[in-house]
Amino acid sequence: MIVAVMMPRQPWTDERLDHFEKRVEERFDNFEAKVDERFQRVDERFKEVDKQFAQVNKRLARIETDISETHRALLGVQRVMLQGFVSICTVMAAGFVAIAGGL
């Protein structure tokens, strides 16, 4: 069985309160310094991330341009293929007419 012995607390004198206040202020000052340092690190990392996003944006712009150019090229190929199809159909129709006329 464990018995806890209660010690009477010392009264809070003005001197003890002043010391306590000083210690609390010192601890908060240290805490604020640590928080400021960490926020500076985070800010530096975000600056690097911003640089990387800028590079990604440039790459995406180039890709977008490449896709637009490819789209225009495919439209040109489609146009040429359609013209070729119409030409072949015309030649075939003329040949059928010539064959039918010779019978």
Image (cartoon, rainbow, N blue to C red):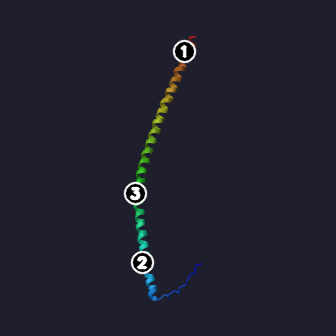
Closer-to-camera residue (97/8):
8
Residue that carries the numbered disc 3 in the rendered image = 48
Q: Check the image and report above or below for 73 versus 26.
A: above
**Residue occupying the point 45% across, 38% down:** 70
For discs 1 and 2, the disc positioned in front in the rendered view: 2
Q: Is residue 39 above or below residue 27?
A: above
Q: CA distance from mark 3 to mark 2?
A: 33 Å
Quarter of the figure that contains the C terminus: top right
| Dot 1 or dot 2, earlier in sequence | 2
- What's the residue type where badge 1 is placed? Ala
Query: Which residue lies at the image location 46% right of the left edge and 88% below the top edge?
Result: 14
Residue 24 — which label?
none
Q: Residue at x 56, y 17 (%)?
A: 96
Which numbered disc, 3 or 2, marks the residue closer to the eye? 2
Three-letter code, disc 2: Glu
| 3D distance between C-alphas at marks 1 and 2 | 106 Å
Total residue callouts: 3
Residue matched to label 1: 98
Residue underneath mark 2: 26
Circle 1 packing at 10 Å, graded few (<14), some (14-19), many (20+), is few
